[in-house]
Image (cartoon, rainbow, N blue to C red):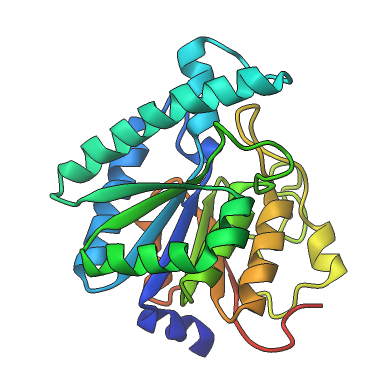
């Protein structure tokens, strides 16, 4: 459990939450979960740590507002949904964080931004930390096309963790970690508490995505963890159902799946 104990000293923390974790099955925003997340992140920040939230949900929120049942194939309609949804999503986050007197900022970036202006983005994060602000990051879906967008926000969260030399990335999702088989279809599936090496076998354990409103799945989270570990940052995949799980992660408890940062962890 020593490696779990190391998480207690994590100072710079990136938390990623996906679309399926902040929406109901019908696509509407899960306001209660967003409020709990705002409370927990503010409390963690108030304890002296630096926190970034990477949040999906812009397209999903836009689809709900526009009355669409699934992500559209038409690129311009998807961009329109992102444009509508991002404004709504940020308004809700700001409202919830305001209840705890916590200022937040919005940073929308693309792969092109990171490649061309990575140092500026890092400097911006550092200045926001110094101001006591929690940055909320998302892929700039309203202008991003396949050539310049990140494949998913799981990978974006790992990029952000690398940019700020984070100590810990926590990816909150609809399952409580990585399993040896799909727990939704296999009753005997077993959670893997610590994954020391990301091998092709580990990668093959991940399957599909969970929601018609979401982009990623466990595969994208494994890829993000792989990048994170390689950059020297611990990664944990944990369940989003109760954001207070973040306290357990930071207390070194056995929740989710830990991918310890160390040389040779990537196969």
Q: Residue furthest top?
A: 67
Q: Residue furthest front?
A: 116
> On the rendered structure, is 232 left or right of 249?
right
Which quadrant is home to the C terminus? Answer: bottom right
Q: Position of residue 183 (x, y in %)?
A: 70, 49
Q: Nearer the viewer, residue 138 or 256?
A: 138
> On the rendered structure, is 169 left or right of 106?
right
Q: Nearer the viewer, residue 104 or 97?
A: 104
In the displayed structure, 76 sits above or below 57; it is above
Q: Position of residue 224 (x, y in %)?
A: 65, 61
Residue 232 appears in the rendering: yes
Q: Position of residue 12 (x, y in %)?
A: 39, 73
**At 79% from the left edge and 66% from the top edge, which residue is drawn?**
202
**At 29% from the left edge and 72% from the top edge, which residue is drawn?**
49
In the displayed structure, 45 sits above or below 82; it is below
In the displayed structure, 99 sits above or below 221; it is above
**At 65% from the left edge and 44% from the top edge, which residue is drawn?**
149
């Amino acid at each position: 459990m020593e490696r779990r104990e190391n998480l207690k000293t994590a100072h710079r923390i990136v938390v990623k939450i996906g679309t399926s974790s902040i929406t109901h099955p019908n696509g509407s925003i899960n306001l209660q979960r967003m409020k709990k997340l705002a409370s927990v992140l503010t409390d963690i920040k108030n304890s002296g740590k630096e926190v970034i939230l990477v949040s999906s949900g812009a397209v999903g929120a836009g689809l709900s507002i526009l009355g669409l049942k699934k992500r559209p194939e038409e690129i311009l309609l998807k961009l329109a949904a992102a444009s509508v949804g991002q404004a709504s999503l940020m308004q809700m986050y700001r409202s919830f964080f305001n209840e705890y007197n916590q200022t937040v900022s919005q940073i929308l970036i693309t792969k092109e931004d990171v490649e061309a202006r990575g140092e500026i983005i890092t400097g911006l994060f550092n200045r926001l930390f110094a101001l006591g602000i929690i940055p909320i990051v998302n892929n700039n879906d309203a202008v991003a096309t396949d050539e310049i967008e990140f494949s998913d926000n799981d990978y974006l969260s790992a990029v952000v963790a690398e940019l700020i030399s984070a100590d810990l990335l926590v990816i909150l999702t609809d399952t409580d970690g990585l399993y040896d088989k799909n727990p939704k279809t296999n009753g005997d599936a077993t959670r893997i508490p610590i994954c020391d090496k990301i091998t092709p076998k580990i990668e093959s354990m991940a399957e599909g995505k969970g929601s018609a409103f979401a982009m990623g799945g466990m595969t994208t989270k494994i890829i993000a963890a792989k990048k994170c570990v390689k950059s020297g940052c611990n990664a944990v995949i944990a369940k989003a159902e109760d954001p207070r799980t973040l306290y357990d992660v930071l207390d070194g408890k056995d929740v989710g799946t830990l991918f310890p940062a160390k040389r040779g962890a990537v196969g």
